[in-house]
Image: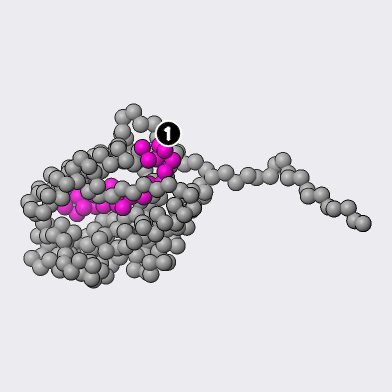
């Protein structure tokens, strides 16, 4: 009778796959008293215009991440308990100056960063941001703000672990927005810029400017541009693969 073969002992020098930890850092001066090394979670940002499919993709990512054992926290624009309601009411009047609008959104972001994003990352959660400082900067740049001033204003922002910009042609965006809302938004159409008296035409021009500005910002911030004109499942697979790389430290 042949004796059972012994399993070979594992080599002592065998490589062990351990996810790399990417040190957290702020873009600028950051939040006083916050030590980035204490933020063990991951910050994932999905950028894109209204109609680009951000909400759909984030919902899919939440289901996938939580099904695989990851706790998630979601943030986005105008979700601060401090100023969100006031900002919404102010926008309805279409009378905000560009500087006031910019500072309103910066306050909304700062409040969420300090009271939601950083605590969630400190607890090890995955934070999914439905837009981040890049949309805010792009909007302000299109409206003529100084880029150096914006970089200083958002120097409190934490550098995300992954950023995906869903790029969709303006002609496709306008069809999606009409199909969903049956109307166009004053601010998302750039009507305050005087690009055109016709809101449809203004929307196309404004979203074209936003797309060009995002492409320019990508050269500085290095986020991934994702073709948002493809089927939702293909986009989800690309985002999932990108997040898996972050989780595994690849």
- Residue 151 visible to the viewer: no
Residue on which the image places disc 1: 38
- In the image, residue 165 above or below residue 204: above
Q: Which colour scheme is used?
A: one colour
- Check the image and report above or below for 90 versus 204: above
- Quarter-wise, where is residue 198 in the image? bottom left
Position of 147 with respect to 66 (left or right) is: left
| Residue 172: percent from left, percent from top | 27, 70
Give 147 or 112, whichever is nearer the viewer.
Answer: 112
How many numbered marks appear? 1
Residue 197 pos. (x, y %): 8, 65
218 left or right of 189 in image = right
- Residue 87 in view: yes
Query: Per the image, is 124 magenta?
Result: yes
Q: How crowded is mark 1: few (under 14 residues within 10 Å), some or many (20 or more)?
A: some
The image quarter in which residue 214 lies: bottom left
Expressed as whole percent of the image width and height from the top left, the position of residue 242 reads 45, 55
Q: Residue at x 40, y 54 (%)?
A: 62
Q: Which residue is drawn at 45% across and 62% down?
A: 237
Q: In which quarter of the image is the N terminus?
A: bottom right
Element under disc 1 = helix
Q: Give the range drawn in magenta.
A: 119-148
Name of the residue lying farthest toward the right = 1
Comparing 26 with 116, the one in front is: 116
Compare residues 73 and 51 and report the one nearer the observer.
Answer: 73
Q: Residue at x 26, y 59 (%)?
A: 49
Residue 112 vs 92, above or below: the answer is: above
Residue found at x 21% / y 53%: 139
- Image location (x, y in percent) of residue 116: 32, 40
């Amino acid at each position: 009778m042949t004796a059972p073969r012994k399993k070979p002992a594992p080599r002592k020098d065998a490589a062990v796959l351990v996810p790399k930890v990417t040190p957290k850092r702020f873009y600028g001066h950051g939040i006083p008293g916050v030590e980035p090394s204490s933020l063990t979670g991951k910050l994932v940002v999905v950028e894109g215009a209204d109609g680009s499919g951000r909400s759909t993709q984030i919902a899919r990512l939440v289901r996938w991440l939580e099904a695989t054992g990851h706790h998630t926290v979601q943030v986005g624009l105008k979700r601060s308990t401090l100023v969100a309601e006031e900002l919404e009411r102010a926008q309805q009047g279409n009378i905000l100056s560009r500087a006031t609008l910019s500072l309103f959104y910066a306050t909304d972001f700062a409040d969420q960063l300090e009271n939601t994003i950083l605590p969630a990352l400190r607890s090890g959660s995955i934070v999914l941001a439905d837009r981040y400082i890049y949309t805010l900067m792009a909007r302000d740049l299109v409206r003529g703000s100084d880029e150096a001033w914006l970089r200083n204003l958002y120097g409190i922002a934490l550098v995300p672990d992954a950023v995906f910009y869903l790029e969709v042609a303006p002609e496709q965006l306008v069809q999606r927005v009409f199909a969903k809302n049956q109307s166009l938004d004053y601010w998302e159409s750039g009507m305050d810029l005087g690009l055109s008296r016709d809101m449809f035409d203004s929307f196309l021009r404004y979203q074209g400017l936003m797309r060009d500005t995002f492409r320019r910002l990508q050269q500085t911030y290095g986020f991934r541009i994702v073709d948002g004109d493809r089927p939702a499942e293909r986009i989800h697979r690309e985002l999932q693969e990108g997040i898996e790389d972050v989780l595994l430290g690849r």
